[in-house]
Each structure stands twice: as C-alpha cells, then as structure tokens.
Amino acid sequence: MARRRKSRRKSSRKKTGRRKAGARSPTPARAVAHPSQPEYLKFAYATWVSERDPGRQKLDRLERAFKRGPLGEIPEVDHWAMEEFFWHGVPGDDWHPIEAYIKHIGERWSAEAREQFRRWKEARFGFFEIGRVRGETVTLREWDVAGDVPVGDPFPAITLGMGGVEFFRPDRRKLMLTYVAPWLPAENLCCSMGYGMVLKRKEVGVAELLLGLRHPDLVVQPLPWKAGPQVRREYEQRWKERDWQSWLEERLEFPFRAIIPNAPIGGPGPFEITDIMYQSAERSREFGVYLQVPVRRGVQMVGVTNVIVLDIVSPNWMLIREYIAYRERFGPPPGVRDAPRVVRLK
C-alpha cells in the first residue's frame, strides 16, 4: 500500500506551478534503515507501519474519516491523512506508529538513535518560506499566510523529499505546505518530512484550509449530516423548515476571512467578509442569503454558497458549510436560478 501511494505521489507534479514532494526513492536492500539515513528510514518505517496490522487497519480508518470530515472535498486528502498518521498516529488512540516501529527495532538501534527517531513525533504542520540551498540543507522559515508575514527565525533543514534539497533550488521565496520536525536540536537542524505542496504566495487559495490538519481531532469528525441516514433525514427536515436569513444573522461572527472562487469581484482574495445583507425571510427564500464584501470600488454582495471560510475551527465555517449542504440537497432559490451569482452594489 505504501509503495503504491508513493509512486502515485511522485507522478503528481502539476504544470500550474504547484508541485508536490514525495519520498525519495529508497535503497531496497536496507531492511531496517537507521536514523543516520533519514531518507531511507521514512520509506522503511512507512512501509512497515502501513502494511501490517494494526497499523494498516488504523490508517485505512483514518483515511476514511478524513474523507467524511471537513476536509473531505480536498483532492488527495487521503495522502494528508497518511502523513498525519505517520507522525502523530490516530487522534485519541494510545497506539502510536512510531513507538510500534521502535518496539519492532528493539536493540538493533542504540538508545540515542531511538530518541532521535522519536523526534519525528514532534512534526509540526504549516507553511514555510523556502530560502537558500546550502550543501545538504535548505533554509526554511515558518510563514503566517493570514498576515502574510514570517514567523520566527530561519532555520536549516534536511529533507526526505525526492531529489533532496536540490528540489528546492528554483523555489526560493515560494511557500511549502508540509510537516517539519526537529532532527538535531543542538545544531538547530530540522527535517522536512517529504510530502507537501510548493506554491507561490498568490496561489495559496484553498490550500490554506489544510491548516485544519493542526486540529486532527476535528478533521476526523464527520460532518454532522453525514453521520448516518437517519441523522441526514433529520437535518434535511430542519433545513426545509428553517428561516435561513435569521438563523445566519444570529450566529455569524464578523469580520472573517474567506475566498470566493470564480467570483469577478477584484481578484482571487482572500477577502474580508464584514456583514450579512439584511432582508426579509420571504425575500431570502426567493433570492437566497448574501454577505457583504468590501472591494476597492465599494461593497459587493456575494451569495453564501460562493464563500469558503478558510479557518475550519471558526464557528462560521460550519454555519456556512451547512447552508451550502442545504443548497446542494435542495437546489438554488427560485428567484436566482438563471441569475448571476455575484451582485454589485453601486
């Protein structure tokens, strides 16, 4: 299973400017890789833990949970589930894949080597600005995409990605979304864990949603209306009876950041949503619910179904996602079925 997925990742480079870094090709003769060869260790560890029970069963369940949860519509979310499993295991489960592999290794590694391998459990997920490539390391710096500012100081990192650090030589100043773990803390040396996305800043877009992986306990929870057939029918009945205008007015918190895909309102965003358009329940049933978006030449009104909240931890994310699920189930409001999806206010 691990070999099949890694070959699929290697073929996933895209011509749009987005690139994915898969694991470097291993040396098959190494039955048990040592922490002194981290590029081989990931392959040996990932193969062992994902092709034997209980790891295989736990990983399969985690991948299915990711697909039912708030990130389930993101392409290849099962790959991200796999990375999350390798470094942090299953949320709420005492069985950890790294500890299982260390037990499998036994005394073949020194105590120091085992502790070094355990540092991969500290892998943190985020955006990192790519800096200079020097020798066997690439300089990284954590990046706050919401504020478009760096976080903390630059640091050197080795990488488990295919091609080694040379992969990053043409990507200076771009952002990489990936896991990074400490490797030699005394030398301030970290380890980029080998799977991720390389993006220009203006290309981040919906990829920011993946920061929800910092909250795996939330990511594995199914959307409430997908918990089962009976629950889905109960939600559908509520949706049909609900005054969506008042329901959203009472619950949405402003302002909040969002992207508005394919909406000609002044660029790709993200945008700051500042308020809801106040209207009667009757009018909202006929034309839908709209949000206010300040732009350079005034304010535009955008239908709620066009809005993607970027922070899945925000209460707004679930509120808007529920309204979108309602519209997906019952269709657009009758008054706008043939109308433009974005309305400009003069």
Image (spheres, rainbow, N blue to C red):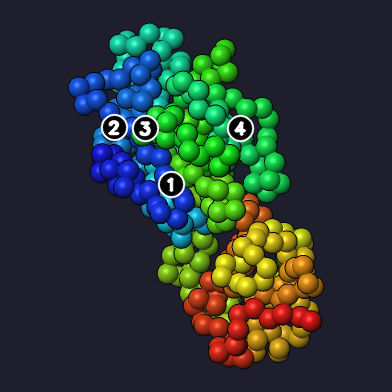
- Mark 4 touching mark 2, by CB under 8 A? no
User: In the image, what residue occupies the spot 45% across and 21% down?
Assistant: 136
The amino acid pointed to by label 1 is: Arg
User: In the picture shown, does residue 86 fall above or below 289?
Assistant: above
Residue 19 numbered mark, or none: 1
Tag in front: 1 or 2: 1
Of 321 and 309, which appears nearest the observer?
Answer: 309
Which comes before the other along the chain, label 1 or label 2?
A: 1
Residue under circle 3? Answer: 163
Residue 25 numbered mark, or none: 2
Element type at mark 2:
loop
Element type at mark 4:
strand
Which comes before the other along the chain, label 1 or label 4?
A: 1
Q: Position of residue 81 (x, y in %)?
A: 42, 45
The amino acid pointed to by label 3 is: Gly
User: In the image, what residue occupies the spot 65% across and 86% down?
Assistant: 287
- Mark 3 touching mark 2, by CB under 8 A? no
Quadrant including the N terminus: top left
- Crowding around mark 2 (Cα neighbors within 10 Å: few <14, some 14 to 19, many 20+) is some
User: In the image, what residue occupies the spot 72% across and 85% down?
Assistant: 281
User: In the picture shown, does residue 205 fall above or below 340?
Assistant: above
Q: Tell me if 332 is positioned left or right of 227 in this view.
A: right
- Mark 1 touching mark 3, by CB under 8 A? no
Of 137 and 275, which appears nearest the observer?
Answer: 137
Separation (CA) of disc 4 from disc 2: 26 Å
Which comes before the other along the chain, label 3 or label 4?
A: 4
